[in-house]
């Protein structure tokens, strides 16, 4: 008894160890997986070699399993049922009857048949139960595979719907873009027609000189109906780009597409017209906002457009810079010329955070400031200050002998504060222009002049 127990214990332990070994081999070397793949490949190859595409492997497996089940059934019947049948059944004359023996009571045949039935049922029930369990697992496996296939098909269907949705979006995007292109280029065609009027060099230069050199700004701008129509057409195109060009939910892609169409418009506008536009647009808040949102001055050059201006201080158009102060800097986007301007003293004058500097230039640029001063026993003088794109010029005129002495200082040698403008030359000369009620002006380090009055011409 102990021997059998230990034998069963050994077999059980061996099976557990063998299972662990199989698991380790599969995890590290995928032995069973590779065997299965090789068998599957072999079966597919031989299946393709038959014209009827017969699955030979399936037939062979079916036959082997059938033979194995038949053999086990035969052995079960031969070892278990056959000896019992031989002991209790008699098959003479093709009739199956119970044998008559001294151990069998003729009056209890029904009971003997009942005993026989119990024997059959007791042996077949476990076998049928085992087969039922196998069929249950087979049913579960088939159901699992069916659900897996359904999930794969559903996944493929979902992906197909997504691809179809993406295709539909691309089609809608293309249709929207085509509709916008039709509207945009119709507007651009009208704008180009107006642009022809100002494309002639002579007329363009005349318009530019009237505004920035002759200072006839209001006359030049507001009495030229064609020019006003030109600006209105430009404003309509830019508004259309900003509001109608809605082809994607991606913000970066949307901005990139809008910039592309703005660049097309910019290619039609010469730099001199951008200067004129900058002077006009700040008086039209809608147009100003549209230009800022589109970054329309991204290619603007800040130098004089006409050629008859001097090259002093880089030939910058001070009249233009005075107006650009009114715009948000986003209107320049990544304008390289504006970035270069930021590295110069002009940026602090026209775009700096200190409003006094800008206001001074706005009021006094290209005007003469005459200061009547009294210098103690020396007498009275006129100090005449003039600010232009060339810098600042200051002149002394002695009222007694009318002698006039003039000097020039560029803006790089001037320091601007909230209450004064201080100019230095050779580190030994200085003066202060008052911004408010200041009664004295220091002309140099030795003498203080009393301010009598200020006259701006």
Image (cartoon, grey):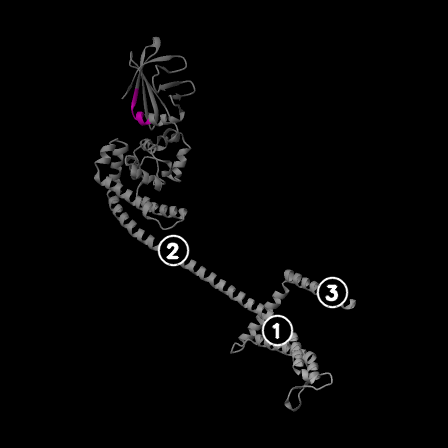
Relative height, residue 262 to residue 358 (above, below): below
Residue found farthest to the bottom: 93
Residue 199, horizontal then vertical, whole percent? 26, 43
The magenta segment:
361-369
Estimate the spatial distance between the alpha carbons at disc 3 and disc 2, rounded to whole Å: 69 Å
Q: Nearer the viewer, residue 229 or 212?
A: 229
> In which quadrant is the N terminus drawn?
bottom right
On screen, residue 423 above or below 191? above
Helix, strand or loop at label 3? It is helix
Point out the tag, 2 or 1, that comes first from the N-terminus: 1
Residue extending farthest right: 2
How far apart, in angstroms, are the residues tagged by discs 1 and 3?
A: 27 Å
Picture quadrant of residue 216: top left
**Which residue is labeled 1 in the image?**
128
Crowding near the residue tagged with mark 2, few <14, some 14–19, many ≥20 C-alpha atoms within 10 Å: some
Q: Tell me where residue 105 sits by quadrant.
A: bottom right
Where in the figure is residue 163, as x and y percent of width and height? 42, 59
Residues at circles 2 and 1 in contact by the CB criterion of under 8 Å? no
């Amino acid at each position: 008894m102990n021997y059998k127990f230990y034998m069963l214990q050994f077999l059980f332990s061996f099976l557990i160890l063998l299972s662990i070994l199989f698991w380790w081999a599969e995890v590290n070397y995928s032995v069973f997986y590779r065997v299965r793949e090789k068998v599957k490949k072999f079966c597919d190859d031989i299946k393709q070699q038959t014209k009827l595409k017969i699955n030979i492997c399936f037939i062979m497996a079916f036959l082997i399993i059938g033979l194995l089940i038949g053999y086990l059934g035969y052995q079960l019947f031969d070892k278990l049922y056959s000896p019992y049948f031989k002991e209790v059944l008699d098959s003479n004359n093709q009739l199956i009857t119970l044998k008559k023996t001294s151990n069998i009571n003729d009056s209890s045949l029904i009971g003997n048949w009942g005993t026989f039935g119990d024997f059959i049922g007791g042996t077949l029930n476990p076998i049928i139960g085992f087969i039922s369990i196998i069929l249950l697992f087979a049913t579960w496996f088939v159901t699992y595979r069916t659900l897996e296939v359904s999930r794969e098909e559903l996944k493929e269907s979902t992906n197909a719907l997504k691809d179809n949705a993406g295709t539909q979006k691309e089609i809608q995007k293309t249709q929207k873009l085509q509709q916008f292109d039709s509207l945009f280029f119709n507007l651009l065609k009208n704008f180009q027609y107006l642009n022809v009027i100002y494309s002639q060099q002579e007329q363009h230069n005349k318009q530019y000189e009237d505004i920035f050199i002759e200072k006839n700004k209001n006359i030049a701008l507001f009495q030229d109906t064609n020019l006003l129509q030109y600006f209105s057409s430009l404003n309509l195109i830019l508004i259309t780009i900003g509001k109608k060009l809605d082809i994607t939910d991606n913000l970066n892609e949307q901005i990139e597409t809008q910039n592309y169409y703005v660049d097309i418009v910019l290619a039609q506008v010469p730099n001199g017209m951008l200067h004129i536009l900058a002077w006009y647009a700040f008086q039209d808040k809608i147009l100003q906002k549209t230009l800022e949102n589109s970054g329309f001055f991204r290619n603007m050059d800040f130098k004089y457009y006409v050629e008859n201006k001097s090259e002093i201080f880089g030939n910058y158009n001070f009249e233009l810079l005075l107006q650009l102060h009114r715009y948000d800097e986003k209107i320049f986007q990544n304008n390289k010329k504006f970035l270069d301007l930021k590295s110069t003293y002009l940026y602090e004058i026209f775009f700096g955070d200190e409003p006094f500097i800008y206001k001074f230039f706005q009021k006094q640029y290209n005007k003469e400031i005459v200061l009547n001063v009294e210098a103690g026993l020396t007498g009275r003088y006129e100090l005449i200050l003039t600010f232009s794109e060339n810098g600042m010029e200051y002149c002394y005129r002695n009222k007694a002998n009318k002698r006039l002495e003039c000097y020039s200082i560029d803006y790089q040698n001037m320091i601007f504060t909230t209450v004064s403008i201080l100019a230095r030359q050779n580190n030994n000369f200085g003066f202060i222009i008052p911004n408010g009620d200041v009664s004295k002006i220091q002309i140099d380090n030795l003498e203080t002049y009393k301010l009598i009055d200020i006259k701006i011409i």
